[in-house]
């Protein structure tokens, strides 16, 4: 029997959540009465996550698992799951139960109305600090203003993709992946479904502030050239101010106003040097992305695959 729906879950040190997310997914999907499969992608976990996935796959042929050779990252795990999915449509979600499985029937209902992509919109984020909520809201609104792609605000990667969107997504080879932006870039008919995001069920988030900042940088540099334009205009502004300052300094010297020459020189050099370093840093971000792309290394490597009626691709 063909698979109607694949549910893809990246997992990294999620041994405390895997059994519960499996239980809730099975209950929801069996209630939805659609042929389904559950695809866990282990992103190099150091705990018993992969052992639990193997056990689930051994006892339930609707469960499949892929284990990376090392930690390749959350977005690469999504890519691997989407590549391996056999369903006509795919739901991607996190395994920490902040993406509630009970929302899947609603996503399916919207898909049956004709929408190719149905994404979940967070109306409330429980269990998160005010700082994280504020910075996330500010980031998505900034991203929407500086890009030409209509990336929905207050959304994560929790979404359903139909067969057309899935086939198009699989053609995207880039390494620095911002999945929610890439799916928005695809186009097709898309709609959001609101939900209240609960607190994490167990364990710790694999996205500390450092990774969140890197992820935000990937999102901005993947879909916008505005940082480069800002660097250009910053250089123009500083150069203009420096020129004006030097002209004023020359006029005052001609008017016999005694000013220390070294002060003006040091100020101008420091400002211009600072702008140059910022500009070089921004250029380095884009050049580094080009360097990563031209190497053409695979996005991920699978060490082991389990489950399903046959071996996973």
Image (cartoon, rainbow, N blue to C red):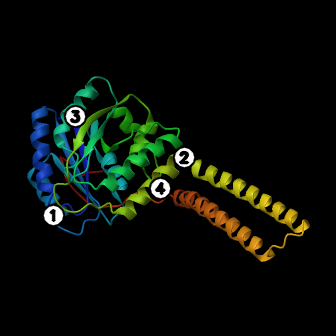
**Crowding at label 1, few (<14), some or many (≥20) Cα neighbours within 10 Å?**
few
Is the residue under label 3 in contact with that under label 1 (CB below 8 Å)? Answer: no
Labels 3 and 2: the sequence-earlier one: 3
Labels 4 and 3: the sequence-earlier one: 3
Query: Mark 3 to mark 2: distance in Å?
Result: 36 Å
Please tell me whether mark 2 sits on a helix, a strand or a loop. Answer: loop
Query: Mark 4 to mark 1: distance in Å?
Result: 34 Å
**Crowding at label 4, few (<14), some or many (≥20) Cα neighbours within 10 Å?**
some
Is the residue under label 4 in contact with that under label 2 (CB below 8 Å)? Answer: no
Can you tell which mark lies on residue 217? 4
Labels 2 and 1: the sequence-earlier one: 1
Can you tell which mark lies on residue 51? 1
Of the two numbered discs 4 and 1 in the rendering, the one whose residue sits closer to the viewer: 4
Query: Mark 1 to mark 3: distance in Å?
Result: 27 Å
Please tell me whether mark 4 sits on a helix, a strand or a loop. Answer: helix
Labels 1 and 3: the sequence-earlier one: 3
Q: Is residue 110 left or right of residue 237?
A: left
Please tell me whether mark 3 sits on a helix, a strand or a loop. Answer: loop
Please state, as top left, top right, bottom left or bottom right, where the N terminus lies in the image.
Answer: top left
Of the two numbered discs 2 and 1 in the rendering, the one whose residue sits closer to the viewer: 2
Q: Position of residue 301 (x, y in %)?
A: 36, 61
Q: Position of residue 287 (x, y in %)?
A: 59, 59
Q: Foreground residue, 242 or 286?
A: 242
Q: Residue at point 53% right, 58% down?
A: 289
**Crowding at label 3, few (<14), some or many (≥20) Cα neighbours within 10 Å?**
some
Q: Which residue is mark 2?
A: 224
């Amino acid at each position: 029997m063909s698979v109607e729906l694949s549910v893809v879950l990246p997992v990294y040190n999620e041994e405390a959540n895997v059994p519960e997310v499996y239980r809730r997914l099975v209950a929801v999907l069996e209630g939805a009465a659609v042929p389904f499969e559950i695809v866990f992608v282990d992103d190099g976990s150091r705990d018993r996550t992969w052992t639990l996935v193997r056990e689930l796959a051994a006892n339930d042929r609707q469960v499949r698992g892929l284990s990376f050779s090392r930690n390749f990252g959350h977005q690469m795990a999504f890519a691997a799951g989407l590549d391996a999915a056999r369903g006509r449509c795919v739901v991607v979600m996190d395994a920490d139960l902040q993406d509630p499985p009970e929302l899947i029937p609603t996503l399916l209902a919207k898909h049956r109305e004709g929408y190719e992509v149905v994404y979940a919109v967070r109306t409330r984020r429980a269990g998160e600090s005010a700082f994280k909520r504020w910075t996330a809201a500010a980031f998505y609104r900034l991203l929407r203003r500086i890009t030409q792609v209509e990336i929905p605000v207050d959304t994560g990667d929790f979404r359903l993709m139909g067969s057309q969107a899935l086939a198009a997504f699989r053609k995207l080879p880039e390494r620095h992946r911002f999945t929610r932006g890439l799916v928005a870039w695809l186009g097709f008919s898309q709609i959001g479904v609101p939900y209240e995001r609960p607190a994490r069920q167990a364990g710790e988030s694999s996205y500390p502030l450092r990774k969140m900042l890197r992820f935000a940088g990937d999102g901005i540099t993947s879909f916008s050239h505005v940082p480069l334009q800002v660097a250009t205009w910053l250089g123009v502004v500083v150069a203009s101010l420096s020129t004006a300052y030097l002209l004023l300094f020359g006029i005052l010297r001609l008017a016999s106003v005694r000013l220390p020459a070294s002060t003006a020189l040091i100020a101008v050099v420091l400002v211009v040097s600072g702008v140059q370093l910022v500009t070089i840093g921004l250029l380095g971000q884009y050049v580094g992305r080009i360097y990563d792309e031209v190497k053409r290394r695979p996005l991920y490597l699978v060490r082991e695959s389990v489950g399903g009626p046959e071996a996973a691709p």
